[in-house]
Image (cartoon, rainbow, N blue to C red):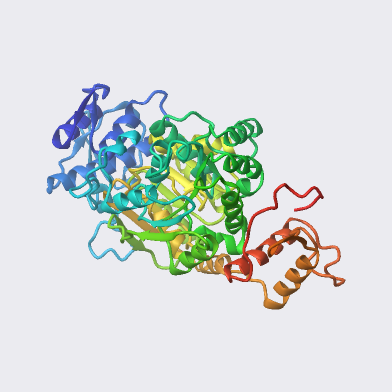
Amino acid sequence: MVELDGHDAFKALARLLECADDGTAWRAKSPSVERLRIALTELPQHASALDLAVLLRQAINHERTRRGTAVPVIPVSHARFSDFRHWNKVGLRMTIAGDARLVSIEPWHPEWLSVEGNEVDAFAASETIRREFNAAGCEGDPFLASVRRTSYRSRGQRAAVRAALSTPAGGSLVVALPTGEGKSMIFQLIQTVGFVGADQQENQGTTLVIVPTVALGVNHEQEAVEVCGLAKPLAFQGGNDAQNAIIAERIAAGTQGLCFASPEAACGRLRDPLRRAAEAGLLRALVIDEAHLVDQWGTGFRTEFQELSGLRRELLGAAPSGQAMRTIMLSATLTDSSLETLRALFGAESDFESLAAVQLRPEPDYWIAPVASEAARIDQVMEALHHAPRPAVLYVTEVAAANAWHARLAAAGFRRISKLHGKTARAEREEIVGEWRAGAIDIVVGTSAFGLGIDYAYARSIIHACIPETLDRFYQEVGRGGRDGRAALSLIVPTAKDFTIAKKINAQQVISIDRGFERWSTLFARKIRFGEGRFAVRIDGRPGAGERDIDMFGETNTDWNLRTVALMARAGLVRLLGSPYPRIAEEGD
């Protein structure tokens, strides 16, 4: 298949639109031209005429920027457009001249945005290069061949990789890199190359990668299969007992290689297999992806993010001399608070270093609409999605909103769409992530569950029909766009209600000193002594001896007990050592 660029690619596309070419003997370097070519030629056909018209607008917009002059009208006689009547809704003008249908582009200047003469979608559609990858000064090390690379994406990635692979046994390293600069290469190289100075025994066994979402685990699994040559299963996922049993057995035997799991799985079902691997010197590294969540999520909910510090110490204590695992923490949004939390939980009694190569992302072109009513917001977002370059992500905060927007887009005639949120089933998540990576979806409606680490280079538009509750969430989600270093669009369309929702989510519920002391006193009163300042406490016990606490049992109560202990560990009052081993025989946690 011939690869075409610039004028040659657009000329070939014009021939395809005139039915003078079937589009199967060439492909375009431009992502927008290539996306339209694929949508027109794919079998079976998934794209609607509306999907195709938006892609046509994007391709013409790109060509107009490339030429630097007005693009002439384009004859369109392809059968896929024969019944389309809504050209003006997607910013295209169609006229009939004899038997020919002539299409040209109209600038998009929405009245509800202060555009000041600028076209909202033009910069993103232009595919202007905003960040150079693999540039001078990023020459690769020989070992990059093991992950099919010859150079680094940036100098920051090079420094991060070299620092990570030089981490001493038992040491901890925090790495902060901008989104899109390839943090995943670090754990891929730990798997394929190993650590500097480690003997062959140390560079065997499992590297456990903690991920916050199933979608991210699936994404990492697929990439590791392609890049590292590993065989599935690599992602530990709730509800897949057969696959999970295979992973647990491989970890215990030291044959798993990479494993992607949630903190809940690591502290629960995988704890004993990890312990056996550590005892045999077959646990290479604990990698925490999106490590800022240890501070952000581990304090308010999903306390297991902070319980990982106890699991880590348990596994370090079980390892043979000189074969302790390394701990690598990766993030793109590491605040001072997050770094201090990681230092408090993962830095005591070990080498603890941090490396930051962060920078502002140059790709997004930011637009914020004035606060509007919900009805006005719906109209504005629908207008935006009839013009915005593809692929696009529409972010919302609540599951119900994701479902409503997906139904709304389907009713409007969009077909290459999907939705992903916290209640999306595992198999469906895998399918959506796979289709997104393959470029088969033009719009994903997602909550924050579709975000962390979802790596697809060519996303052009990120639209928020909500207000993200933290700047970190916004940065992560905007970071889905322009990961190829080319221009992207960021558009926020808010309502007054969004502020209330964001503030409510962002309000951390921290236990009071009196209540925390009461919970700790009750836990510690029932302790088991192991000597040398070591104690075991049951975290599923009632929080106090009073009448209101006597019947307080269950997951919520246990989580508050664990949160209390984790907060004490962050304050340096106690040190989490994991679970006693051999395991205590009595029931309880």
Please name the residue shown 61% across and 66% down the image: 569
Q: Is residue 279 visible?
A: yes
Q: Does residue 65 appear to the left or right of 181 in the view shown?
A: left
Please name the residue shown 41% across and 51% down the image: 167
Q: Position of residue 548 (x, y in %)?
A: 84, 70
Toward the viewer: 420 or 355?
Answer: 355
Q: Position of residue 422 (x, y in %)?
A: 58, 48
Q: Position of residue 246 (x, y in %)?
A: 61, 31
Toward the viewer: 362 or 587?
Answer: 587
* Picture layout, residue 573 above or below residue 292: below
Q: Does residue 549 appear to the left or right of 420 in the view shown?
A: right
* Picture layout, residue 33 above or below residue 512: above
Toward the viewer: 427 or 150?
Answer: 150
Q: Is residue 149 visible?
A: no
Screen quadrant of the N terminus: top left
* Picture layout, residue 517 above or below residue 267: below
Q: Does residue 186 appear to the left or right of 324 in the view shown?
A: left
Q: Position of residue 96 (x, y in %)?
A: 23, 35
Q: Does residue 282 appear to the left or right of 575 in the view shown?
A: left
